[in-house]
Every structure is written in structure tokens, then in C-alpha cells.
Amino acid sequence: MSRIIIFVILVSCTTIPKDSKPHDLDIVVESHLKAYDTAREFLKERIKVGKAVTRDEWESLLAKQAIPANQKLLAQIDQRHKLAIAQAKETARQSSLFSLAKVRQDDLVEKFCAEIPKGGALHLHPSGMIHKEPLRKLMVRVNPKVSRKIIEDLIKSGAGNLYPGELDFLNDLPPTPYIDLSPEQQERMVGLFFLPQGAHPFSRFEAVFNFTSLIHKADFDAKRVYYSYFTALAKEQGIFYQELSKGMKANPDGLAYYDELALWLEKEHGVRTNFLMSYGRWASAKRHFQKTAELIKQDIPPRVVGVNMVGYEAHEPLLEKGQGLYGQLLLHPDRPIHTSAHVGEHGDPRNLRDAMIMKIERLGHGVLLADQVLELEIARRLGVVIETSVLSNLKLGVIEDVAEHPFLKFLRLGLRVSLSTDDEGIFRTNINQECQAAILYTDIEYSELKEVFENSLHTAFLEEQEKSELIEKLKERFKDFEKSWLMKLKSL
Ligand SMILES: [Zn+2]
């Protein structure tokens, strides 16, 4: 009897009907979810014995259980998504307190975005958030030696490339302390920390992070200068909670340093701050495994709340680079370490699937999910959380224009999307501009924009009690904002 049941189940799970009927979708999605579970358990077993899962093992394990979706089924899912998006758009229009059409028509977008409460910003890298004013002060204070050779050595030790004109400028510099440069040379040097206008390859962007190591020697007080600067700006722009992803040592001193910094920023600016420990994709998988093993052993202070894999995805897939981190954390559900990862920005789109398998709580960027119909459907069912940075994606060529960015598609399909600036110093952007881009280049409704900002707290790595308090604070701010804008728009 049991054999017959098993046979029936096997047949129903592995046969792909020629014509896709509505229920096929559920069968296919279920098969993938089961395959995800199997792969996750397999990964955990491997982590226990300290042996890495290879790409071939991973793909063949998944292929065994997951029924591939045929073209007809994919078209059917896509059609359903289009319908769901249209319905969500209409619901959002009806539930919006006012229409953004008026804000767009009357050229009020800048003012509107300056005043709308933002709540939290979850995807931020302090190394990419340095602004010119504090940088000038820090360069004088640290007074690093600069020359083409020094910069090239820095780049060799990390990653990235400069443009020929920039290298020519450095070529002419003798290895001299910064303060001995002429004012023009100093300003040009400071300018290298920021991306020129327009879109740039990731390698030019990465070069900036090598410059920041010029000021890494800065003492704690000096570092506070630039942390303080961007936190004050965040507050001015309506942010009262920020999550900062930063490389740090997984030992008591390394963790205490950022815990103390977070507390100080809160005290100085009233902006609640948490840190995530960054794991650079450029480091070895073995190093990530060891670092995670160290982290798990630590008594982690309250302001360090999670981990985030960062860096260029293209040649560093999540499975190969991230399993020692996220796989190991799966074995320690008792440890309060939240997870985020940069996936679906560049590179292998399977990173998104693998992030779902590894149960990573938030996905940074996730843009490539838009082209993966089945995985997008699975992401909907799993309630995937996306940290969006529209202007970052534009600056780094992930999208060609804002109108094609899928964040609104994701939101309308039920994914929980929030908005951040990523590296606002390097890009010379801010959260107000992110908001402006969303309003000007998409058909976003007011209730959807509000939802994006609410998500920045709903999906924050905060204790429930504190999260509720901050959500309440955001609600209060929205009350005032809506009262004022209802009047403003009525009077037009
Ligand atoms: Zn980022």
C-alpha cells in the first residue's frame, strides 16, 4: 500500500504536463520549495563536518527535486503577475490620501520629498558615506602620504581601477604628505573619493574604498567627525533609525568599538543606530567561515545586530563565498544574528535563489529578480524583503534609467521593499533624491511611497518593543505631514 502511495506522489511531482493548467503552478512552486529545504539541510550537514558544498553538487541536488517550469507556465505566471500589479496599483490609488499627480504637475516633488518622514535607512555603508566637508578635515588631521605609487599599491591590495586622467594627476605627485600639496592638488585628491557624474563600472566605484583606507588610521575622535556628519544629514532628511554595514573584527574590542560608536551617534543626534558586520566578497570563503565561527563565540553587544555580505557579485557567487557565513548561522538559530546580503545587483542571478535557500532575511538590491519569473513567484510566497537603492543602481549601471527599476513591481507583488542610499557620499546622493527619483520616473502612488518608508522600520533588525515605538513615532510624523500636505494641495 505505502509503495503505491509513494509511486503516486512521485508521478505527480515529477511529471510535467504538456499543457500548463492553473494547478501546475502550485505543483512546480512546491517542488522548488521542497528542493530549497533539501538543499538547506544538505548545506547544514556539510557545514557541520567542515566540508564545502560544490556548485555541481548544489545544482544537481536542486535539479533532482525542482520541476523546471516550461515556457507556457512561465508565461502564465508572468500574466498573473501583471494582473496582480495592476490590481495593486488600483488599490494603492484608492487608498492614497492624495494623488501624487498634483505634486508632479506643480513641481513640488523636491519639497514633498524633503518633508516626507522616512523612518529608517537599512542599506548604508559608512565607508561610502563620507562627504567632502568632513573629508577635508580628516585628510588634514591624518595627513597621509599620497602619490600614484601609494594609490596603486592600495588598489592592488584591494580592488578597482582609476581612469587614465586620474592616474596622470597622481603620476605628477611626489610621495608627499597631504598638507604639503597645493590647495588645487588637495581638492583634486579629495575629489577622487567621489564618483564623477554619470554611470560607472563597479571597478571605478571599488577604487574609492581603497582611498578610504588612507584615512583609516584616523583615531576614534576623528572618525566621529564623518559619522557625525552623515548622521546629522540623515536626521535633517527625516531618518531616525539607521543600519550601517561596516567591516569589523569579530572580537570583543572590534565589536565594542562599533557598539560605542552607535550609542554615541544616538546620544549626539537622536538617530537610533545599529551596525551590521560586513563580509567582503573579495576575502576567501575560508576566511568568512573562520570569522563567522569567531563571531558565534562572542558575547555580541546590543548595537551590532547582524551580518551583510558586500562587494562585487560578478565573480563571487553567494554559494561559493557565503556558505561558510550564512550556512553556519543556520546551525545557530539560538544566536541573535540577523542576516542581509548583496544579491541580484550584478552577476549570477542564482544568488537570489541561494539567498532564499539560506534564509537570508533581507536582500540588498535584488534587481535581477525581476527577470526570473519563477523565483519571483517564490519570493512572493516567502515574503522576501528587498533593500532598494535606485540611484546607486543607476550610478553603477545596474539599470539604465529609473523608469525600468523593478522596485515598484516588487512592492506591487507583495515583496517588502524599503529605500536607502547605499553609498551616498561616493554617489553624491541622498534619501530625498531617492524619493524624488521614485516619484518623477515611476507611477508610484502616495500610499505606496508611504509603505516603502514604513517598511524601513517593519523590516529593521530591531527588538520588537523598540520597533513598535519607532513605528509609532513614524505614524505620528506622518499625521503631521499629511495634515500639512492635504491643506497645501487643496489650496492649489
Ligand atoms: Zn550596498
Image (spheres, rainbow, N blue to C red):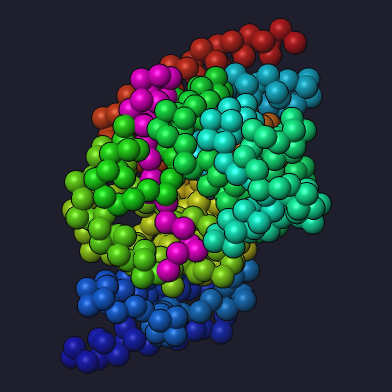
User: How many badges with numbers are in the image?
Assistant: 0
Residue at point 70%, 40% (across, down)? 189
Is residue 125 shown left or right of residue 297? right
Q: Can residue 418 be seen in this view?
A: no
Q: Nearer the viewer, residue 298 or 77?
A: 298
Residue 29 in picture, x, y percent from top left: 44, 69
Give the side of residue 336 with respect to residue 410, left or right. left
In the rendered view, would you say 475 is above or below 423?
above
Residue at 75% in and 43% down: 196
Give the x, y percent position of residue 446.
Answer: 60, 29
Q: Can residue 60 be seen in this view?
A: yes
In this rendering, is residue 364 above or below 193?
below
328 inside magenta stretch: no
The residue sitting at 40% across, 81% down in the picture is 54
Q: List x then y, in percent, for residue 375.
A: 51, 65
Q: Nearer the viewer, residue 335 or 470?
A: 335
Image quarter of the N terminus:
bottom left
Q: In this view, does 461 lie to the left or right of 351?
A: left
Which x, y percent locates residue 127? Answer: 52, 42
- Residue nearest the viewer, comparing 179 with 255: 179
| Whether residue 165 is situated above or below residue 477 in the rendered picture | below
Please report the bounds of the magenta region as a residue range.
Answer: 261-284
Q: In which quarter of the image is residue 212?
A: top right
Q: Quadrant of the C terminus?
A: top right
Q: Does the magenta stretch include residue 278?
A: yes
Q: Residue at x 68, y 27 (%)?
A: 100
